[in-house]
């Protein structure tokens, strides 16, 4: 497994595919995607070109939240989200 990280926002369709692949896909994709569009730093994780996770630095007005990560469960157990969280924390101030 070689995960590629990119700090470019993926397209809305890719994001919707990610959410539809998750067990709890009841999230409002359009509203969440808008939050990613308005974030100052975004990090996307790809496995062989397929979006498997996305994270963002939370806005300053979001209470007790410094970053948000949405990731497929089988990649969480491989600590991909832990590495992404470290990169997001490093870029939260700017």
Image (tube, grey):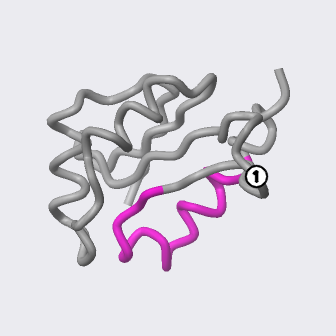
Is residue 21 toward the left or the right of residue 34 in the image?
Answer: left
**Image coordinates for residue 47, horizontal then vertical, percent:** 31, 50
Q: Is residue 39 above or below residue 68?
A: above
- The quarter of the image holding the N terminus is bottom left
> Residue 64, percent across and down?
78, 57
Question: Which picture quadrant has residue 71?
Answer: bottom left
Q: What residue sits 52% from the left and 46% below the top?
A: 55
Position of 40 relative to 29 (above/below): above
Crowd rating for badge 1 (residues with CA inside 10 Å; few <14, some 14–19, many 20+): few
Task: Label 1: state its secondary structure.
Answer: loop
Residue 9, horizontal then vertical, whole percent: 40, 26
Depicted 89 relative to depicted 78: above or below: above
Which quarter of the rendered picture does the C terminus lie within?
Answer: top right
Q: Main secondary structure of the magenta part?
A: helix
- For image coordinates 36% across by 76% down, the residue present is 74
Residue 22: x %, y % from top left: 25, 69
* Quadrant of residue 23 within the rendered picture: bottom left
Q: Report the front residue among 50 and 18.
A: 18
Q: Nearer the viewer, residue 52 or 39?
A: 39
x 32%, y 30%: residue: 10
Quadrant of residue 72 within the rendered picture:
bottom left
Relative depth, front residue between 35 and 16 = 35
Q: Is residue 14 left or right of residue 51?
A: left
- Tell me if residue 5 comes above or below residue 63 in the rendering: above
81 in magenta: yes
Q: Residue at x 48, y 72 (%)?
A: 76
Q: Is residue 53 magenta?
A: no
Q: Residue tagged by mark 1?
A: 63
Q: Which residues are magenta?
A: 70-86
């Amino acid at each position: 497994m070689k995960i590629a990280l990119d700090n470019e926002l993926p397209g809305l369709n890719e994001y919707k595919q990610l959410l539809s692949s998750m067990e709890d896909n009841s999230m409002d994709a359009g509203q969440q995607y808008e939050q990613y569009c308005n974030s100052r730093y975004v990090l996307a994780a790809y496995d062989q070109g397929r979006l498997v996770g996305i994270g963002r630095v939370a806005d300053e007005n979001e209470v007790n939240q410094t970053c948000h990560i949405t990731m497929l469960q089988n990649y969480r157990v491989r600590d991909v989200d832990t590495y992404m969280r470290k990169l997001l924390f490093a870029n939260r101030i700017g």
